[in-house]
Each structure stands twice: as C-alpha cells, then as structure tokens.
C-alpha cells in the first residue's frame, strides 16, 4: 500500500513515498530552508510559506520519480494538517487536497507530533504499541503513552517553551550558526557540564512536565553578567552545562515514566532526538528499566514526509479519511 506523504509544517518542504504495510521508504525528498532563515537567526513564517509554494510541486515529481512510481500507483495522500506554522501548513494541505481531489485518491490528515513517533516504525518495522514516546523538537516536548498506532495519551509535556527552541536560543546567543542544536551538541563535549549552575527544566512535584523558560533566562543572565565583567566567555562550558541540565531533566522524567507505567519499549523521536547526549542518557535510562529503545536515524529525526506517510497509513487503515473541507490548524 503506497502512501504519498507531504510535510510543510515549518521550514522543510518534504514529499515521500512509503509502503505503509511493509514500512519501507521508497523515496523521501526534503527541501531545507536553513540557508534562508539563517540570515535572520530563526524561521520567518512568511518566507517559509513562500518557499514551500516554490518547492512543493517540483519535489512531488522528484519523490515519485525516485520511487519509480506514478500517481496511479498511490493508494492515499497523507498530509500534515497540524500543528505548525499556519501559513506553512496551508501550503501542504491545499496542495494535497487539490492533488487528491483531481486524481480521486483518498486523503488523510496527519498530526505532526504523531508523525515523529511514526518514524520509529520505519526504523524498526517490528515495533508495535504499547510503548512510551518522548517527542522532542523545536516546537514540542512531550511524553506519550502510545496504546495503539493512532492513540497517544499525553502523560507529560512542557508548560511553555520546547527543548529544541531552548537549545537554538542559547546557541544563537553564544555565536553558534543557526540552527544551533547540532553545533551546541558538538561543543558540549569540550566543556565542563558542572561549570555553571542552572535550574532544572524538570518541574518539581508529582508530574512528568517540563518548563524551559527558566533555564533560558538563567543562561542569558549568566552570559550577560559575564560580558559585563569584560572577561572571556567560556562558550564550551556554557554549552556543556546547558546541555547537561536539559538532557538530565528529560532523562529524569523518562525514568519516572518508565517506572510508573512499567512499559518495556520506548521511542525517542523529533529533531532533538538527534542530540547525541540525549540519546545516550535515554539509552541509559532504558537499560536501567530493562526497556528497549528505538531512535530513528538522524535523517528521520527532523521534519520529513516519510514519517507523515507512515502515520497516514495508520489513518488509512482505520478508514479515517478527509475531503476538501480539511483545513490546517496551528495547534494540536
């Protein structure tokens, strides 16, 4: 069963062809906008939307060609409908609706966060629910109890900013190229993780929630204070201490979640799942609980259409279709 997936929730335009039954990727084309947004230090929504418009038709042809199929072979079109930047989402949704309607192909709507978790099925085709999923990206930080392919129960989440946004913000302040996550990950190995005392993003109390606004403010205050002293800013120590605090908080809550639920399978996904420190920390937690961990390869951690197609297959299998009434939503 071939699914044509489309993703345009932020600053990557992506189209993929996936065999949903065998969980095999036939093509996965990603048109990144990083070079454009780097000029502004972050994603500019209007620019992102225009770039999606310019790219989506061309990469759809490329995805079909690379997969060696035509639209006649496609069983369904899956598109990210929420959450994300509303203008960017509308490009993908309207293109997918037009294509599906004109070719009389079934259309399914996909939640972007659930799609990140679906990347794990493409990584380990034998993976089946139930399991815990930590989804960490630039816009989302949540712990889910996944009871079946389509049912996600939120048991922990951020109450303000996301971990990915927190990494990018501090990375930008200390001079890392946008996006700052990858550069910060590498630099953290060169510093002392205990050099700077920072508040934990893991909220106190009987919960599995996070708050990343406090650690961002504390780090910014430290950086500004050091600059005012006129001394040399030890960016490696900042990267190491900041990374340690964020990763430790995520691992702490996952430790509690695994102990509380008793699950023996866990998925780590989303853009921040590419962080090597986080991968190692969650792997350690899973070993403590005798749980297996599935983490997608770097190519499937960021936004991509293959994960959307696989999530879309589960919608198709459940008979959950949408029509031309489908609209995008910035929220979940």
Image (cartoon, grey):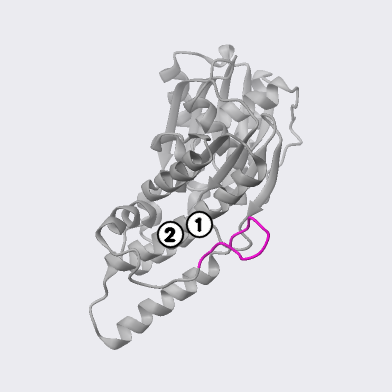
What element does badge 2 sit on?
helix
**x 37%, y 81%: residue:** 224
- Residue 275 pos. (x, y %): 40, 48
Front residue (pair 272, 129): 129
**x 40%, y 59%: residue:** 243
Residue 9 is at least partly visible in this image: no
- 25 w.r.t. 120: above or below: above
**x 31%, y 61%: residue:** 176
Front residue (pair 74, 240): 240
Q: Is residue 325 left or right of residue 287?
A: right
- Residue 144 pos. (x, y %): 64, 43
**Tag 2: Cα neighbours inside 10 Å, few (<14), some, or many (≥20)?**
many
Q: Is residue 8 left or right of residue 316?
A: left
Counting labels gives 2
Q: Indicate yes or no whether the magenta region holds residue 15.
A: no
Front residue (pair 275, 78): 275
The magenta stretch spans which residues?
Answer: 200-210
**x 50%, y 26%: residue:** 122
The chief SS type of the magenta part is loop
Q: Is residue 265 left or right of residue 107?
A: left
- If the image is split into quadrants, where does the N terminus sit? top right
The residue at which mark 1 appears reads as: 163
- Residue 305 pos. (x, y %): 51, 32
Q: What's the distance in space between the residues labelled 2 and 1, CA to CA? A: 6 Å
Callout 2 touching callout 1 (CB < 8 Å): yes
- 204 w.r.t. 299: above or below: below
- Residue 281 pos. (x, y %): 43, 48
What element does badge 1 sit on?
helix
Q: Indicate yes or no whether the magenta region holds residue 209.
A: yes
Residue 194 numbered mark, or none: none
The residue at which mark 2 appears reads as: 167
């Amino acid at each position: 069963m071939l699914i044509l997936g489309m993703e345009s929730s932020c600053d990557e335009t992506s189209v993929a062809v996936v065999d949903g039954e065998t969980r095999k990727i036939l093509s996965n084309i990603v048109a990144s906008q990083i070079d454009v947004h780097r000029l502004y230090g972050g994603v500019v929504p209007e620019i992102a939307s225009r770039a999606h418009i310019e790219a989506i038709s061309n990469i759809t042809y490329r995805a079909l060609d690379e997969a060696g199929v035509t639209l006649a072979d496609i069983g369904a079109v899956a598109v990210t409908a929420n959450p994300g930047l509303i203008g960017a989402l509308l490009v993908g949704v309207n293109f997918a609706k037009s294509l599906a309607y004109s070719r009389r192909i079934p259309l399914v709507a996909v939640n972007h966060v659930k799609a990140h978790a679906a990347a794990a099925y493409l990584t380990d085709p034998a993976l089946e629910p139930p399991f815990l999923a930590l989804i960490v990206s630039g816009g989302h930080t949540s712990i889910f109890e996944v009871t079946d392919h389509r049912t996600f129960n939120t048991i922990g989440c951020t109450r303000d900013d996301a971990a990915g946004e927190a990494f990018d913000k501090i990375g930008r302040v200390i001079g890392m190229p946008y996006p700052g996550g990858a550069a910060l990950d590498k630099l953290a190995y060169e510093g002392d993780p205990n050099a700077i005392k920072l508040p934990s993003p893991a909220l106190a109390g009987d919960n599995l929630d996070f708050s990343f606004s406090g650690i961002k403010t504390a780090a910014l205050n430290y950086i500004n204070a050091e600059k005012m002293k006129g001394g040399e800013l030890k960016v490696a120590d900042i990267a190491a201490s900041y990374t340690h605090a964020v990763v430790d908080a995520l691992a702490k809550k996952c430790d509690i979640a695994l102990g509380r639920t008793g699950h023996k399978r866990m998925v780590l996904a989303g853009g921040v799942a590419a962080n090597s420190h986080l991968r190692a920390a969650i792997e350690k937690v899973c070993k403590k609980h005798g749980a297996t961990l599935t983490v997608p390869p770097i190519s499937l951690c960021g936004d991509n259409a293959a994960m959307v197609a696989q999530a879309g297959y589960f919608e198709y299998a459940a008979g959950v279709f949408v029509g031309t009434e489908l609209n995008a939503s910035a929220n979940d």
